[in-house]
Image (tube, rainbow, N blue to C red):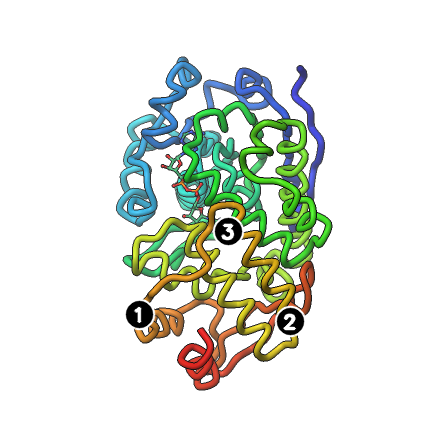
Amino acid sequence: MGVMVINEHNFSGKPVRYYFDADFAQLEQIVPKEQSILLTDEHVYTLHRQRFTGWRTIVIPAGEQHKQQSTIDTIIRQLIEQEADRKSILIGIGGGVVTDMAGYAASIYMRGISFGFVPTSILAMVDAAIGGKNGVDVGVYKNLAGTIRQPDFLFYDYSFLQTLPQAEWVNGFAEVIKHACIKDRGLFELLQQHTIGTLQNNPALLHEMIERNAAIKTAVVLNDERETGERRLLNFGHTLGHAIENLYALPHGHAVSIGMAAACTISEEIAGFASAEKQAVLELLQQYGLPVSFGYDKAKAFDLLKMDKKRERDAVHYILLKQTGEAFIQPIGLTQLQDLFVQVL
Ligand SMILES: NC(=O)c1ccc[n+]([C@@H]2O[C@H](COP(=O)([O-])OP(=O)(O)OC[C@H]3O[C@@H](n4cnc5c(N)ncnc54)[C@H](O)[C@@H]3O)[C@@H](O)[C@H]2O)c1
């Protein structure tokens, strides 16, 4: 199997190479090993230790709770110890937490060095690694500090998925279902015919689905890199999702799923989203092991949501569905949103 460059996309004039169906052993064919520093977390490192042999590697603790500025400081200190210079390339190998921190650390170290990603979770493959937005949480505020800067490459070796815990498959499929809801009715219907189990038993279809999702995210970002319009659609389910994720230490996918269910209810209430379609979304989420409700403290969630980056003055830019596969941005005034929270959610 040769490394396949399926795609090269230009983000603001910067080419990003996508290597699909690649084999980790081929990484040294695309980056000079002596200039590269790998960044991974302790789970991925422990499970795939042999792959890191011969590479300079920085290992950080695993988990969202470490996606904070203090970990970035540790990474930067280690880059200095490893004598990383302006020609060094930082390669994040892991889930979205690792790719977010690799992209952010690389963007600020020496005012910016090159970086690339080897996403190892479904979520990172279909979402987090794509688009150039990278950053850290600040306390409970998700992704509040960060940068927008593109990687040089994305390198997909699907064999990493063999060690991905089942719960992380579920998390990743929340974003896959999100893509289907906002952009791709055909994908929604395909997902309805499957479960995580049947896709795991059909690698060809799974890989095709990952690439289809990478293409959806890429297309949306290419249309709107700086998030002034269409890119906001990717926030479907994330407005409430982010608010409750850190508040209750929920898995990202669960929080987004609950957020998508809430956005469907608001869509039904104020945007004419058919209740049968809403029902189909709720059923699909559950088919992939995701929750659609949760007894969160509405007042607390609403307070956090007001800090959301999607807020402008007195309105939150909520992402709603007109129909399955078609999302739109609806500014909702804080007072109306609070009423919706109390009355329909
Ligand atoms: N930058 C963006 O545009 C963007 C988009 C979506 C999500 N994100 C961020 O991504 C993060 C979520 O990503 P995630 O779900 O991948 O989280 P994660 O990186 O925490 O990975 C989830 C867990 O799976 C483990 N893991 C990853 N790959 C593995 C493998 N192959 N085998 C065994 N274990 C493996 C990790 O160690 C971790 O314990 C959040 O912080 C979110 O904010 C960023």
Identify residue type, mark 2: Phe
Residue indicated by mark 2: 273
- Ligand 1, what quadrant? top left
Describe residue 44's horizontal placement relative to residue 248 as left or right. right
Where residue 15 sits: x, y (%)? 66, 40
Find residue 95 and name its label: none
- The residue depicted at 59 percent of the width and 72 percent of the height is 267
Nearest to the eye among marks 1 and 3: give it: 3
Residue 324: x and y in percent read 67, 61
Q: Secondary structure at mark 1?
A: loop
> At which x and y percent is residue 117?
51, 34
Which residue is located at x 43 percent, y 35 percent?
Answer: 166
Check the picture and name the quadrant holding the N terminus. Answer: top right
Which residue in the structure is indicated by mark 1? 297
Which numbered disc, 2 or 1, marks the residue that appears first in the sequence? 2
Label 2: how many Cα within 10 Å (few below 14, some 14–19, many 20+):
some
Q: Earlier in the sequence, mark 3 or mark 2?
A: 2
User: Residue 262: where, in percent of width, then height?
Assistant: 49, 67
Eyeballing the image, is 75 above or below 266?
above
Q: Which mark is residue 286?
A: 3
Task: Name the front one of labels 3 and 2.
Answer: 3
Q: Is mark 1 within 8 Å of ligand 1?
A: no
